Image (cartoon, rainbow, N blue to C red):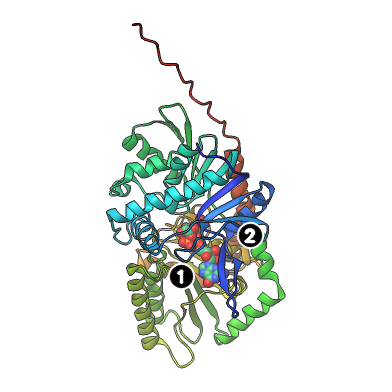
Amino acid sequence: MTASGSADLVIVANRLPVDRVVDTDGTLRWRRSPGGLVSALEPVMRVHQGAWIGWPGGTDEELEPFVEDGLQLVPVTLSAREVEEFYEGFSNATLWPLYHDVVAKPLFKREWWEAYKRVNQRFAERAAEVAAPGAMVWVHDYQMQLVPQMLRDLRPDLKIGFFLHIPFPPAELFNQLPWRRQVLEGLLGADIVGFHLPGGAQNFVRLVRTRVGHKTHRDLITLPDGRPVRAGAYPISIDASDFEDLARSPEVTRRAEAIRKALGNPKRVLLGVDRLDYTKGIYPRLRAYAELVADGTFDVEATVFVQVATPSRERVDEYRRMRDEIDMLVGRVNGDLGRIGRPAISYLHSSYPREEMAALYRAADIMVVTPYRDGMNLVCKEYVACRYDNDGALVLSEFAGAAHELSQAWLVNPYDINGMKAAIVEAATADPKEITRRMKAMRKTVSEHDVDRWATGFLDELDAVKPMKPPIRRRPRRTAG
Ligand code: GDG
């Protein structure tokens, strides 16, 4: 058992919630990274004297723990080789495609697995050092699946929760992983293993029963020492009121108007916003739209598709290939179908401040979100939160976790190009009353189930976990003689 620290709540995530900024004079400072997870956890972090453990970006740099804006941050160093093997390799070229329906072929490399184990052990050791006796530790996402058990071995007194932000695949896919049993055993170190959807939790429980052989009953797993592990669904969300406030602000309102004007005041703006990732279904969505322009359903003088693709994982081969494919498609579509000052697709490979995102959401008549597979998808919830006028249509893939909550969207199968085309046309020609009815219902869901409810819901359940009594050690029997 490791000596304990003083944090009552420890967050373990691949990244720290700050980005390093180097000023023109060369001084280093940290800027809070935008994102729901940080703002959701910030209030509880403050109440609980929380600490956040994560990689600060960069390589081979030993940084001491530091406090930024009142948050205790504990950096974990990665070497250049570990970034390649643990992060780009095992996390993003093995687990990411495997857990997303094998949309791309997962690569299984033994040296990547070794790096994954090594880095997970380092994170677990850090958590063991900073957690107070009996503290809650919340471990996040697919990069950290071995941390729960590694941490429990070091600190059996802790309450450990795990949340997976991406889908958890069915046995038929998961079983491809050469280290499937070790990953399941790693996760079983937690008291609660959380997923976005009940289906993910069911896949996990079934795999534990069949692969590891533990007893299970519904969402409960009982380990041989009697410790229960609960698998549950905790659908993540956004800070809905914050997004709505942003969307209502005069700056964002003005910017939304300016965006439409810059686009030539078209009758209709369609929008896609995604990290440039092969799971997001950007290619089939743009193809579907291009066919609608080609067959005359939409005219480039009246309609435009704005696609924001935020740069992501640019050193992973599969991402480079996909970027080239999309560049080529957009170039061809605009070359064939665009007119001067009127591209069919306005394509932006760049990332923007949150205000600009809100302005884009405000400016768009139809939001098109068509992942092949997505754990949840926050973009569609952000769009809904920004539509305080109850206007705007959402076309949403049935394979996004969010489709389970936003059933009033125009749901599509991204593998079915004709189906997608039909849904886009339906959304574009729907009666305004119908659009309002659907948007109102989705807004109710998003405002009632916000990220704060997600975070407190999970942590309240973790807090209620009863610590296991340490096993009674029997004295060895004296043998006569
Ligand atoms: C994973 C799971 C799950 C994007 N571009 C910019 C920007 N963004 C923001 C969006 C949104 C977030 O990034 C993307 O979240 P998603 O949920 O859509 O997708 P992933 O990044 O794949 O997230 C996903 C999520 O984890 C949470 O559990 O929902 O299924 O894959 O918030 O707004 N933000 C800014 N500029 C950009 O250019 N400021």
Of residue 289 and residue 476, the one placed in the foreground of this image is 476
Of residue 18 and residue 269, the one placed in the foreground of this image is 18
Of residue 425 and residue 233, the one placed in the foreground of this image is 233
Image coords of residue 327 (percent x, y): 37, 79
Q: Residue furthest top?
A: 481
Residue where numbered disc 1 is placed: 424
Distance between mark 1 and mark 2 Cα atoms: 25 Å
Image coords of residue 29 (percent x, y): 60, 69
**Res 410 seen here:** no
Of helix, strand and loop, which one carries label 2?
Answer: helix
Up-down: is 339 above or below 134?
below
Asked which quadrant contains residue 293, the reply is bottom left
Q: Label 2 is placed on what type of residue?
A: Ala
Of labels 1 and 2, the one closer to you: 2
Q: How many marks?
A: 2
Disc sitting over residue 240 in the figure:
2
Asked which quadrant contains residue 106, the reply is bottom left
